[in-house]
Image (cartoon, grey):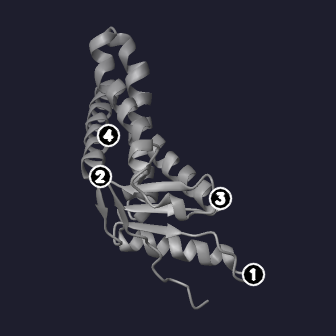
């Protein structure tokens, strides 16, 4: 328990440059006692809160759960954007009498996904991270100190533009749907 919350980031000196210790945090898979999983989760939470640029998750279970959580958030974001775009572009592609059958459900789906993302992911520190797969970027990290052959590497990315995009498209889809529903029932 003495190592709980202790920084384990390792600075790296490679040809491409020096990585500072504050840029990378490694959640090592070291089983000390019966509460190892809770310790791994605590270390991950601390690393997310500290906003490290890279977080390497060595424990397989927590790494897989985190990667799935990020993937679900990405799916909600992409669905909100694509469904909203379909809602807004369908009237241009289909005749007026048929477009509402595609545009209204697509707009509702976009709004639902953007709302769910906003409720579930907006305040989660994990939403600022993406799973890194680029081997060139991974080669700069201190992966030589790991005991696991398949760590999950998270990289911190600015998601302000991403949130603005899906919120703007979802709100535009909401406005379009509200207008169409008003037109349907006002006539």
Q: Nearer the viewer, mark 1 or mark 2?
A: 2
Which of pointers 2 and 3 indicates the residue nearer the eye? 2
Q: Nearer the viewer, residue 159 or 92?
A: 159
Q: Which residue is drawn at the image coordinates 29% and 52% (left, top)?
A: 16
Circle 1 Cα neighbour tier, 10 Å, few/some/many (<14 / 14–19 / ≥20):
few
**Residue 134 in view here:** no
Q: Mark 3 or 4, which is nearer the eye? A: 3
Badge 2 marks a residue whose secondary structure is loop
**Distance from the alpha carbon under mark 3 to that under mark 1:** 17 Å
Numbered badge on residue 60 = 3
Label 2 to label 3: alpha-carbon separation: 29 Å
Q: Mark 1 or mark 4, which has the lower sequence index?
A: 1
Residue at x 48% of width, y 83% of height: 6
State which quarter of the image contains the N terminus. bottom right
For this orientation, the residue located farthest to the front is 15
- What residue would you read off at disc 4? 170
Residues under labels 4 and 2: Cα distance?
Answer: 41 Å
Between disc 4 and disc 2, the foreground one is: 2
In the drawing, what numbered circle is on residue 34?
A: 1
Q: In this orientation, does residue 160 appear?
A: yes
Q: CA distance from mark 1 to mark 4?
A: 46 Å
| Of pointers 3 and 1, the one earlier in the residue sequence | 1
Mark 4 element type: helix
Residue 160, placed above or below residue 10 = above
Residue in the picture at 29% in, 17% down:
91
Location of residue 173 (image quadrant): top left
- Disc assigned to residue 16: 2
Of 159 and 169, the residue lying toward us? 159
């Amino acid at each position: 328990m003495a190592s709980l919350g202790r920084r384990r980031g390792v600075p790296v000196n490679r040809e491409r440059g020096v990585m500072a210790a504050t840029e990378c945090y490694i959640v090592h898979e070291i089983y000390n006692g019966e509460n190892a999983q809770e310790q791994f989760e605590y270390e991950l939470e601390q690393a997310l809160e500290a906003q490290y640029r890279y977080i390497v998750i060595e424990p397989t279970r927590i790494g897989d759960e985190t990667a799935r959580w990020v993937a679900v958030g990405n799916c909600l974001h992409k669905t909100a954007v694509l469904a909203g775009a379909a809602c807004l572009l369908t009237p241009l592609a289909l005749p007026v009498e048929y477009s509402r059958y595609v545009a209204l459900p697509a707009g509702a789906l976009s709004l639902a996904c953007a709302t769910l993302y906003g409720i579930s992911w907006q305040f989660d520190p994990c939403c600022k991270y993406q799973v890194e797969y680029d081997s060139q970027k991974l080669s700069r990290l201190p992966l030589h100190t790991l005991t696991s052959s398949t760590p999950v590497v998270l990289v911190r990315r600015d998601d302000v533009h991403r949130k603005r995009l899906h919120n703007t498209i979802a709100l535009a889809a909401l406005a379009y749907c509200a207008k169409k529903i008003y037109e349907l029932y006002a006539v």
